[in-house]
Amino acid sequence: MAEKIKPALLQFLTPGEAPFKILVVESLYYLPEIIQMLPKAEVYAVASEKDAMEKYAAIAYQVNFWQIDYRSEKLPFAKEIFDYIISDLTLEQAGNPQDIAAGFSTYLKETGSFLTSFRNIRHWSQLKNLIDGHYYNVVARLYAKPEFERLLYASYYKMVYMLPQVNAALDDTVAKLQKFGFENIHDDLNTEFWLVKADKSMPELSLLKSMYSKKERKELAKILHRIEYDVAAEAACQRFWQLWQELGLFPDYIANFVKQAVYHPKRFYECLGKNSLAKLNNILQMVVAAQKLATTANELAELMDLEQKLQNFAGRKA
């Protein structure tokens, strides 16, 4: 028999003192635990029914409540202000799930995440009902794991993580389904719900974006591309080292930024070195850091060769 989902999305969060901004949509049962595990968080909650909010009157002074139906009304928040949006089964109930998912992404910071869940249509209980000629989820939109992943990627999320919530069959139902041709990869047939963390940015980009402002990163990217393509390179290199000093940039950060933003890293480092002879040691540190990020043998070999050339040049200069 199908069970209700067990609230478990907060396992994606780490307790602490971080001053996160968090929006909870309909799943108000998470509020007390959020307040306990993240006491400095600024918490907002949206629900379509006033009665649902009244159940949490005791913590009303710690939560910004809004009575809104997310399925049909635009949320009254500025863009890119939330670190997390948390809501179980949100897209099951939406008539336009991709619009809802994409709309939520606009309220997330560049480093933010959407925590949600969905009922697995490939769970043994759902398949058994369908085989028996029954379907009890009339108002719900059910998904398989690959379909839900595609929906989120199409809604501007860059990384999707899923954890299973298992309700295993106690008899031979799963074995029978496999005989009928249903694959059971990763025990999918026993997974009743999937818990989902959808990140707005890739992990590497999320780290980069968390350290400096959007304006600062935009200027840095512009300068890196000028150096990469040797456009007014001398002036661009001078501005790069000014930013290095002003923002407190460091080799590992630049190596990561170059990895994500620059199409021709070798060309960038060579141009930077040619126009920054007094900074060769800093550039060498960037190249060594970049080697740790290499994803192919050719990329690593190219960076090691560049390191050797820079070391030789630095030795002659000394």
Image (spheres, rainbow, N blue to C red):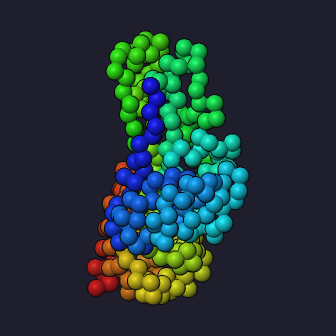
In x, y percent, where is residue 86? 50, 55
What residue sits 36% from the left and 64% below the top?
36
In x, y percent, where is residue 203? 43, 58
Q: Number of numbered discs present? A: 0
Q: Is residue 248 above or below residue 36?
A: below
Q: Is residue 115 above or below residue 141?
A: below
Q: Is residue 273 left or right of residue 92?
A: left
In x, y percent, where is residue 228? 53, 70
Specify the quadrant of the image occupied by residue 89: top right
Residue nearer the viewer, 297 or 24: 24
Q: Quadrant of the C terminus?
A: bottom left
Q: Is residue 228 above or below residue 32?
A: below
Q: Is residue 317 left or right of residue 202?
A: left
Q: Is residue 54 at all visible to an observer of this figure?
A: yes
Q: Is residue 89 above or below residue 176?
A: below
Q: Quadrant of the N terminus?
A: top left
Residue nearer the viewer, 76 or 313: 76
Q: Is residue 252 at all visible to an observer of this figure?
A: no
Residue nearer the viewer, 55 or 279: 55
What residue sits 50% from the left and 86% below the top?
238
What residue sits 61% from the left and 64% below the top?
66
What residue sits 58% from the left and 55% below the top?
51
In x, y percent, where is residue 270? 45, 72
